């Protein structure tokens, strides 16, 4: 894998530095995790690979985090982060004011059985360091 920062603007490099760190917040109520809605995202690095921004990190609850590879889009409405969790859940977050990530988790069909009917759950995180 070749990492390239050639042609990257100063503003894009600054955005990468802003995202690296620990984010904490809460996920909308889920039956399987009602006792602990707290969620943590640790972004360890953000690099441009083949012209696309990719972040490497860990996501989960205080009881345990799993490794995730995050797609970072910087066009259109701002900065968007997305990834697929180990159980197939789809995560889509938008960076707001440089220190808030707000978006949704779309549950797999299996996980949404017996729930409220919607497969989407709100996720809000704030940068803590």
Image (cartoon, helix red, strand yellow):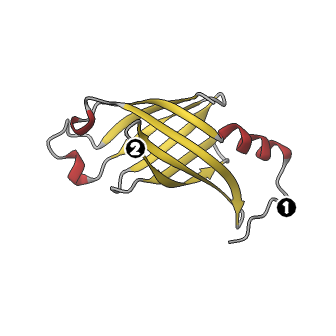
Residue 108 x, y percent position in the rendering? 29, 53
Using the image, determine if residue 83 lies above or below residue 32. Answer: below
Q: Quadrant of the C terminus?
A: top right
Q: Using the rendered view, name the quadrant where residue 64 is placed.
A: top left
Q: Using the rendered view, name the quadrant where residue 38 is placed.
A: top left
Residue found at x 55% / y 42%: 42
Q: Quadrant of the N terminus?
A: bottom right
Residue pointed to by mark 2 = 64
Label 2 packing within 10 angstroms: few (<14), some (14-19), many (20+):
few
Residue 119 x, y percent position in the rendering? 28, 44
Mark 1 and mark 2 lie on one chain; the one further toward the N terminus is: 1
Tag 1 and tag 2, C-beta contact below 8 Å: no
Residue found at x 67% / y 47%: 74
Q: Nearer the viewer, residue 77 or 115?
A: 115
Residue pointed to by mark 1 = 6
The disc label shown at residue 36, or none:
none
Q: Using the rendered view, name the quadrant where residue 26 is placed.
A: top left
Using the image, determine if residue 22 lies above or below residue 106. Answer: above
Residue found at x 77% / y 46%: 12
């Amino acid at each position: 894998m070749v990492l390239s920062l050639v042609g990257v603007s100063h503003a894009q490099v600054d955005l990468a530095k802003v995202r690296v760190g620990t984010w904490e917040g809460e996920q909308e109520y889920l039956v399987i995790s009602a006792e602990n809605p707290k969620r943590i995202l640790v972004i360890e690095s953000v690099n441009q690979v083949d012209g696309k921004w990719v972040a490497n990190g860990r996501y989960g609850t205080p009881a345990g985090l799993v490794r995730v590879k995050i797609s970072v889009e910087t066009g259109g409405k701002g900065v968007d982060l997305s990834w697929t969790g180990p159980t197939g859940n789809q995560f889509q977050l938008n960076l707001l004011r440089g220190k808030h990530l707000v978006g949704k988790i779309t549950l797999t069909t299996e996980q949404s059985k017996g729930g409220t009917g919607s497969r989407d759950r709100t996720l809000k995180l704030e940068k803590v360091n």
